[in-house]
Image (spheres, coloured by chain):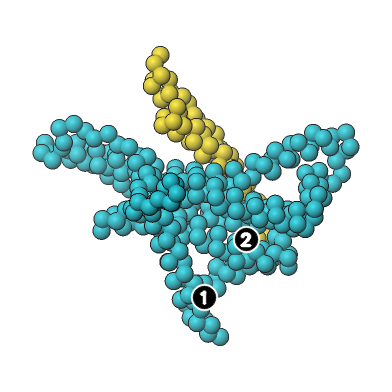
Chain colours: A cyan, B yellow
């Protein structure tokens, strides 16, 4: 039997990977504003994003590969806004582009296999606080644009054309509730997708470790299939990172479209 | 039945929701594939809606996961 097994098996806690650890304790007027691992990874994401976009700013007439990659993303967002909102949508390209790229880079950086060199990446979008703030910014833009452009007619959004007068109160309440639910669903979708993926990877890796610790037989029966499944799930997680970033941005565009063009 | 056992049983029951969400997600892609095979030219234009539909359906399945997590770690 392997002599490396601990006397008592350690309890696996798949939620430990999400703990926020302060890297530098700071305080302002009694409020804790420490620089946490979450903030550190947001900084890393921002630097990588700036590096990516700046690398493609050579403005060659026949673009090189890097410039083509950056132009792919910018034209992707531009087309998305133009197709869904029309020409009035082009002023939202900076916001939607930043949102989409930030979430995409955050999700993918959280999957990097940096554990082999001792650095454990942290997916800050797996916290409801972060995704909640992003959804809040989106909904604030929607509300501000809606009320600025249409005044109180904005409430006409909740009464679709052609509803019989008798049903208007009921439909209004249902549509209002559905509208209020939008930022929550937006934040929850990204948060739960990221958290579920990382919890699944952690649980599978605990199977690999515990299986291998129990001897060669269990390592082959339990550890090896779990490891192969982990490879598949990692591929799925890369896909889900992209999909969740895309869906967040696309739903943002839909909600802005509701505010710009009421129906 | 003590609280700990009840929480874990509840979390296990909440996992049934993920199976139901799997039916929903499979429905989305099944109908996309069957209609894409009828009209391949129009398929590429609808991919955006495909992924939006998938994400929205997936959310409801992941809500079942959230309920399980709340039961295990919060309550």
Mark 1 secondary-structure assignment: helix
Q: Which chain contains the residue that carries disc 2? A: B
Real-space Cα distance between discs 2 and 1?
Answer: 22 Å
Residue depth check, mark 2 versus mark 1: number of the one nearer the observer: 1
Q: Please indicate whether residue A118 sits to the left or right of residue A128 in the image.
A: left
Q: Which residue is drawn at 85% across and 41% down?
A: A163
Mark 2 secondary-structure assignment: helix
**In-front residue for pair A36/A100:** A36
Mark 2 near mark 1, Cβ–Cβ under 8 Å? no
Same chain? Circles 2 and 1: no
Q: Residue at x 87, y 44 (%)?
A: A162
Q: Quadrant of the N terminus of chain A?
A: top left
Residue A39 visible, this angle: yes
Q: Which residue is drawn at 40% across and 14% down?
A: B1
Q: Position of residue A241 (x, y in %)?
A: 48, 54
Q: Residues within 10 Å of mark 2 (few under 14, many from 20)?
A: few
Vertical order, A119 against A185 (above or below): below
Q: Which chain contains the residue that carries disc 1? A: A
**In-front residue for pair A221/A58:** A58
Q: Please indicate whether residue A57 sits to the left or right of residue A145 in the image.
A: left
Q: Where is residue A215 in the image (x, y as percent from the top left)?
A: 17, 38
Quadrant in which residue A221 is drawn? top left
Vertical order, B72 against A45 (above or below): above
Quadrant in which residue A62 is drawn? bottom right
Q: Residue reaching furthest top?
A: B1
Q: Residues within 10 Å of mark 1 (few under 14, many from 20)?
A: few
Determine which residue is flagged by label 1: A68
Q: Where is residue B25 in the image (x, y as percent from the top left)?
A: 56, 43
Determine which residue is flagged by label 2: B44
Q: Please indicate whether residue A189 sits to the left or right of residue A9 in the image.
A: right
Vertical order, A12 against A68 (above or below): above
Q: Which residue is drawn at 39% across and 42% down?
A: A199
């Amino acid at each position: 039997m392997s002599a490396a097994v601990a006397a008592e098996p350690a309890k696996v806690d798949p939620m430990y990977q999400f703990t926020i650890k302060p890297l530098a304790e700071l305080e302002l007027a009694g409020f804790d504003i420490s620089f946490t691992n979450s903030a550190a990874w947001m900084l890393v994401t921002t630097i990588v994003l700036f590096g990516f976009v700046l690398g493609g700013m050579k403005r060659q007439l026949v673009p090189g590969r890097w410039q083509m990659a950056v132009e792919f993303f910018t034209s992707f967002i531009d087309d998305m806004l133009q197709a869904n909102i029309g020409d009035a949508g082009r002023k939202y390209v900076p916001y939607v582009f930043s949102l989409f790229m930030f979430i995409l880079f955050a999700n993918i950086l959280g999957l990097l296999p940096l554990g082999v060199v001792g650095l454990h990446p942290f997916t800050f979008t797996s916290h409801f606080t972060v995704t909640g703030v992003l959804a809040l910014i989106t909904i604030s833009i929607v509300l501000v644009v809606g009320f600025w452009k249409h005044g109180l007619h904005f409430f006409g959004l909740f009464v679709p054309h052609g509803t019989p007068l008798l049903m208007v109160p009921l439909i209004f309440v249902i549509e209002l509730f559905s509208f209020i639910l939008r930022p929550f669903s937006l934040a929850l979708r990204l948060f739960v997708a990221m958290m579920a993926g990382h919890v699944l990877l952690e649980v599978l890796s605990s199977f690999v470790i515990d299986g291998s610790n129990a001897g060669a037989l269990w390592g082959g029966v339990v550890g090896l299939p779990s490891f192969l499944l982990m490879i598949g799930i990692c591929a799925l997680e890369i896909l889900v990172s992209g999909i969740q970033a895309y869906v967040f941005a696309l739903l943002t565009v839909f909600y802005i479209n509701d505010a710009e063009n009421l129906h | 039945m003590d609280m700990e056992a009840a929480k874990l049983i509840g979390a296990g029951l909440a996992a049934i929701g993920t199976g139901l969400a799997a039916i929903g997600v499979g429905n989305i892609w099944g109908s996309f594939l069957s209609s894409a095979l009828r009209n391949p030219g129009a398929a590429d234009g609808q991919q955006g809606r495909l992924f939006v539909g998938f994400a929205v359906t997936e959310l409801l399945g992941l809500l079942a996961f959230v309920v399980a997590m709340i039961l295990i770690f919060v309550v």
